[in-house]
Every structure is written in C-alpha cells, then in structure tokens.
Amino acid sequence: MKLLSGKVAIVTGAARGIGAAIALKLAEQGAHIAFTYVSDSSAEKAAALETAIINLGVKAKAYQANAGDFGACETFVNAVLAEFGAIDICVNNAGISKDNLLLRMTAEQWDDVMNTNLKSVFNMTKQVIRPMMKAKSGSIINMSSIIGIRGNAGQSSYAASKAGIIGFTKSIALELGSRNIRCNAIAPGFVETDMTHYLNEGEAGKAFLEKIPLGRFGKAEEIANTTLFLASDLSSYITGQVISTCGGLNI
C-alpha cells in the first residue's frame, strides 16, 4: 500500500524545481495531483508534468492560477473540488525572490514578494480548510526557508515573507488541531534548481558551501521527501513544526 493512496493533493507553483519534485513524489505514493503555474511561459513544462504524473497511474491536472490573488485561489480550489471531489493535502510552495538591499528596494518589489510568498499561503489555506474541516482531516504544508529563520543581507523581503509563513503555520496548527488538521512548515536551505544556478558559481558558491555541515547543496527530491513525510500518516502526531531541510545550516 502506498503512503498516499487515493488522497488528493494540491501543490502551488509546481511547474518546475522543488514544486515539480514534490508533485511527482506525492504522485509516486498514490496521490492525485492538482497543481498551479502562473505564467504562459511555464505552460509547456506544466503540461509535461501533468503527463508525467498521469503516467504514474494517478489523476493530475494543471491549473494556471496566481496563488497571490485571493479570487483566483477561490476559483482554483472550487475547480479542484469539482474535478477531484476532495482536498486532503495542500502544499503551499509558490514563491519568488526579488533580492535587493533595503536602501534600493522599491515598494513594488516588496509587495510582489509578500503577495506571492506570504499572502498566497493565507489565500490557499483559507480556501482549503473548509473541505478539510468537513472531512475532519487534512495536512497543510507551507514552504518557508532557512532565510526566514536566519535572515540574509539583501533578502529582507524574502526573509520577512518566509518568517511570516512560520508564524502563520504555528497559529493555524493551534486553530485547526482539534479538527484533525495538521499544519507544518519546511525550511529548505540552499537547493540546486534552475533558479539557483548561481550557487555553483565561483567564490560565491564556495562561500555558501563552507557554511553547510554536510558540505553540499540540497536536491529538490530531498525537499520532496520531507514533504511526503509531512503529508502522510508517518507524521500523524506532528503539527505546528518547522522542519529545517538544510544540510545542517541551521545548527
């Protein structure tokens, strides 16, 4: 028996990178997958991921939706319920970074990061808790970051949004625990994806590596493994926690 057989999972921002790895990992363990992507440029990758998931023997559908828009999230969740009939797992993974020193950061840059990274978590959680409360079961997994715990120069907006996710996660865990709905966060460290190619470049990459006790960057599949654990009954007595998946960077 697979860990998530028959479950329905939502993954936001899943056209590539960590989100795509999570969608595939949950599908491998029997979950039906509904996932989002935002831009037209990601449509081809989203379609390929949808096909790859279906080939694993489960149901899958890609939706073009902006998780930072409350109305779009409401429409998306209603469409998932109509198509799949339930929502058992919600992985709030959508995120961006617009790094800049505070002195140079614009209000628009700040708002873009907050809307995509933090407001999206509110938007989606607000929508999925109703069917979860009705079912008296659910797992909500929010993608924070080690930067939300440590902070980082030039990333004040990103750090603030990811720290906000941690506070939100702990509060929702307290609100919904009595309904058998768990809410946890994952704080990845430096993970190799097509968005973080700079990690392997010259002296900057070496400086990052020197800070990591395990001596290497993480892989998207390793974040997906943590997500699977929190999505499944293997973590049935875990809620309100932040799991740092960072190679020891947070020691």
Image (spheres, rainbow, N blue to C red):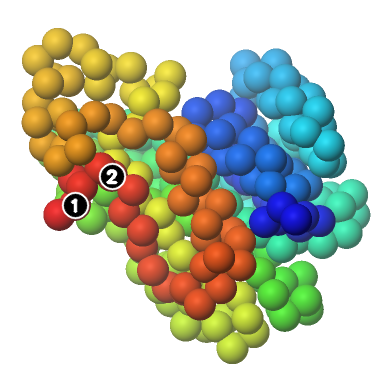
Which residue does the image show at 61% across and 28% down from the upper left? 15
Which residue does the image show at 59% across and 88% down from the upper left? 178
Q: Position of residue 69 (x, y in %)?
A: 61, 48
Seen in the picture, residue 237 relative to 227 is either above or below; the reply is below
Residue designated by label 1: 250
Say whether residue 193 is left or right of residue 246: right
Q: CA distance from mark 2 to mark 1?
A: 7 Å
Q: Mark 2 packing: few (<14 Cα in 10 Å), some, or many (20+)?
A: many
Q: Work out whether residue 57 or residue 2 is closer to the camera in this orientation and state it.
A: 2
Residue designated by label 2: 246
* Residue 121 appears in the figure: no
Q: Position of residue 32 (x, y in %)?
A: 78, 47
The N terminus: image quadrant = bottom right
Which residue does the image show at 21% across and 12% down from the upper left? 201
Q: Are marks 2 and 1 in contact (CB under 8 Å)?
A: yes
Seen in the picture, residue 109 relative to 198 is either above or below; the reply is below
